[in-house]
Every structure is written in C-alpha cells, then in structure tokens.
C-alpha cells in the first residue's frame, strides 16, 4: 500500500500570515523572530521523531525543524512530506543546534516550526531537482525538456535566468546614460532580403499573403535614424530560418544599436565601456580598455579567423620567404606558406602525427595533408614529414 499523503490546504485558505522572509534571508540577527516561510520541500529526514527538512525557493534554502513538544500535529504532517511538496511554515528563528552549515547563506540558523500547512503535494519525480543533488544531475535532455517546469527549479538554470536579467538591466542603464531611446519595433513585417530565409506567418485578413518574422530590425532602425531619433537601442528577438551554428539558432536575442552622426571611435568607446560594466557588475572583474584592435588582414594572416580567440596563443608564422628556392616542390611555388609552432610537442610519435593528419587535417579541416617538422626535446636532429 502507498503511504498516506499530507492533507492539502488551498493557498487562499492558508491560516498563516503572508510570507515575511524568503528562504535565503534569515541570519543570526533574526534569532527570536516569528516568521512565515513558503516554498518547496528540498530534502526531508526524520531523526527519532524530530523531523527536519530544507525549504527552498529561488532565493536559497532554510532548514526547518519540527518536534512533538512544539506541535505534534504539525510534526505528524511533516512526517508525510516528500520532495517538491509546496508548504507554508510558521515558527521562530533559532541558532542551529547541530552546528552551522558553512555551505549555506542561512547555515547558522533554522526555523523551529509551530505550524505547518501543505499547499500542494507532488508525485514521484522523473529526475532529482534538489539543490543537494544538482551536481549529480544527469537526466537526459529530452526528459528534462518534457518536464521543463521541474528542470527550471534547479539552481543552475535559475542562476542563468537571473544572470540574463541582470545583464539586461546593465545594458539598459548603460545606453540610457548615453541618451539612447529603447524603442520596440514590429514583429510582423514585410519580407526583406537578408542573410537567411524568413519564417512566414499567414495572414487571415489577406488569404495567400504572409508576414515575415524579422531577421533583424534593420529596416525600422534605419527609418528611426532618418526620422531624427538619433540614438536607438533594443533588446530584440530575431528569427532566421537557417542551419544551427554554435552561436546561432532559429530564434535568438540580440542587443540592437543604431547611431546617427557616429564615428568609429564613438562606437568603439561605447561598446568597450558596456563590456567593462558587464564584467565588473556580473563577475567583479576589471577588464582593460581600450581593447586591442587589429585589421581584418592582420587577423586572418595571424590567426586564420576574423574573430580570433587571443587566448589560443598559436599564431601563424610566415615561412613564405624561407621556402623560396628550397627545392620543396609542394611549397616552393606557393603564394603563401604559414605554419603553427607548438612548443613541447617535438616528441610526438609517428602514430600521433598520422592520427592528427587523418582526423583533423583531412577530415575536419578538409586540407590535402599535413606537412610538419619535429625537433625532439633531447636535441636530436630535426625531422620533417610531408603527407599529401
């Protein structure tokens, strides 16, 4: 037989006063206060008739303890609690009797409950959402998406959403301080030639005709510039019917900016200041401005990319002049010969280099083969190999 569940009291009939604190608020300075907390049961344990459980909301965790001496009915209700039950607790804040939990902001206190109300129960969970089990979370992605409301209870995802919210506020404050207007532009628009296919929305009023979802607000922000609204910004949704990429999906959000009477240095300074503010306020990190600048040619010739990651460190070395008149037919007549120097890899064996040639150079990059030199760490002779 299944265990009996706790009786449910609808939220509108909850006898407790409104919530006084969140589950991340309480500290030693609150000891002695009578408080009301509401949230989800995170973990639950019964130690010889004394019931403990952690109550969770998006602000944190608070430990709650119930004993027969305080309220035997409430303690009996607590014995029937399960993970993700929604409850309301009323009680007095006290110092933790078993010692502080340094891993929690509320870890020095607990609430000794005098009253417990179950606002809703929960069925067996398809995967754990407890804050204590979050690091062991390995549920399949499709299962988590099917139960997205549970997945979004996990601290990791809630922190991501909060971070995104804070980022938006910093962006808005930054552009407001520079006299930008945040203007909302239409989502249903006429199809305009851009870099991808449009997503189309059929018109009910005009059968056979379609609206396009915007790939960007380009048309509207140019209209705003011509109209004299010289500084525009919008955190906007864009829609592009194209194949997935690492930094792009069919629906994505961008910070869209337009300026009249701008110069390159104006734009550089504006965005560099924004980046510095984001890193400082979100991560507490100071970044140096102005950023390093390079031309397109320098980026392509040095890193082989127009958006290089400067942490990579393996810059191209130009060996074009070195191979002129060298007798190496493959390279002697090449318009440009570039190499990557990788310190400390001169002892790699033939098998490792063959695997690099097959899996990376030929399959992933699509090049014809690998040409390499190796200088062993013992000072042995320089070795060369051509794979073509």
Image (tube, helix red, strand yellow):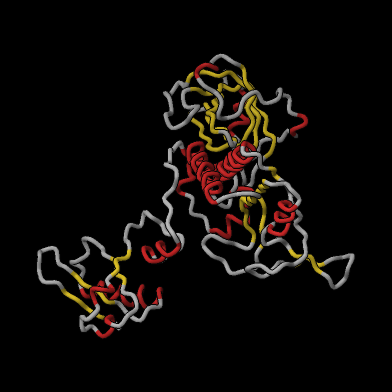
The picture places residue 50, in percent across and down from the top left corner, at: 52, 26
Q: Is residue 192 above or below residue 45?
A: below
Q: Residue at x 66, y 42 (%)?
A: 180
Work out whether residue 44 or residue 172 is closer to the camera in this orientation and state it: 172
Q: Residue at x 42, y 41 (%)?
A: 288
Mark yes or no: residue 213 visible. yes
Specify whether 291 is left or right of 171: left
The picture places residue 383, in percent across and down from the top left corner, at: 16, 74
Work out whether residue 281 or residue 63 is closer to the camera in this orientation and state it: 281
The picture places residue 217, in percent across and down from the top left corner, at: 69, 57
Specify whether 364 is left or right of 77: left
Mark yes or no: residue 84 visible. no
Q: Is residue 37 above or below residue 312?
A: above
Image quarter of residue 205: bottom right
Count every numbered label the image shows and give the total: 0
Which quadrant: the C terminus? bottom left
Residue farthest to the bottom, as pictured: 329
Work out whether residue 59 or residue 341 is closer to the camera in this orientation and state it: 341
Image quarter of residue 241: bottom right
Specify whether 251 is left or right of 311: right
Q: Is residue 80 above or below residue 91?
A: below
Q: Residue at x 41, y 50 (%)?
A: 292
Q: Is residue 367 above or below residue 245?
A: below
């Amino acid at each position: 037989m299944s265990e009996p569940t706790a009786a449910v009291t609808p939220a509108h009939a909850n006898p407790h006063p409104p919530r006084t604190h969140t589950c991340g608020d309480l500290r030693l300075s609150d000891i002695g206060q009578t408080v009301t907390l509401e949230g989800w049961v995170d973990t639950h344990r019964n130690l010889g008739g004394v019931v403990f459980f952690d109550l969770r909301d998006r602000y944190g965790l608070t430990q709650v303890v119930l004993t027969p001496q305080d309220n035997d009915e409430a303690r009996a209700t607590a014995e029937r609690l399960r993970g993700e039950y929604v409850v309301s607790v009323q009680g007095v804040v006290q110092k933790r009797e078993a010692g502080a939990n340094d891993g929690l902001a509320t870890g020095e206190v607990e609430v000794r409950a005098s009253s417990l109300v179950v606002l809703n129960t929960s069925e067996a969970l398809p995967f754990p959402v407890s804050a204590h089990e979050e690091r062991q979370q390995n549920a399949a992605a499709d299962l988590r998406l099917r139960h997205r409301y549970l997945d979004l209870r996990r601290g990791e995802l809630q922190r991501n959403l909060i971070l995104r919210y804070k980022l938006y506020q910093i962006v808005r404050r930054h552009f407001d301080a520079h006299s930008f207007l945040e203007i909302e532009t239409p989502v249903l628009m006429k199809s305009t030639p851009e870099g991808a296919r449009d997503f189309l929305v059929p018109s009910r009023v005009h059968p056979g005709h379609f609206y396009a979802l915007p790939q960007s607000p380009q048309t509207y922000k140019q209209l705003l510039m011509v109209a004299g609204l010289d500084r525009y910004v919008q955190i906007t949704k864009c829609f592009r019917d194209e194949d997935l990429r690492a930094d792009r999906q069919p629906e994505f959000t961008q910070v869209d900016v337009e300026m009249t009477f701008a110069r390159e240095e104006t734009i550089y300074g504006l965005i560099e200041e924004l980046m510095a503010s984001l890193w400082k306020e979100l991560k507490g990190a100071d970044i140096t401005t102005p950023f390093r600048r390079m031309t397109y040619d320098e980026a392509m010739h040095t890193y082989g990319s127009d958006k290089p990651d400067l942490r990579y460190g393996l810059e191209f070395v130009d060996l074009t002049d070195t191979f002129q008149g060298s007798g190496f037919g493959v390279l002697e007549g090449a318009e440009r010969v570039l190499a990557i120097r990788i310190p400390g890899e001169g002892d790699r064996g033939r098998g490792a280099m063959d695997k690099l040639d097959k899996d990376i150079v030929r399959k992933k990059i699509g090049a014809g083969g690998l040409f390499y030199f190796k200088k062993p760490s013992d000072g042995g002779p320089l070795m060369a190999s051509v794979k073509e």
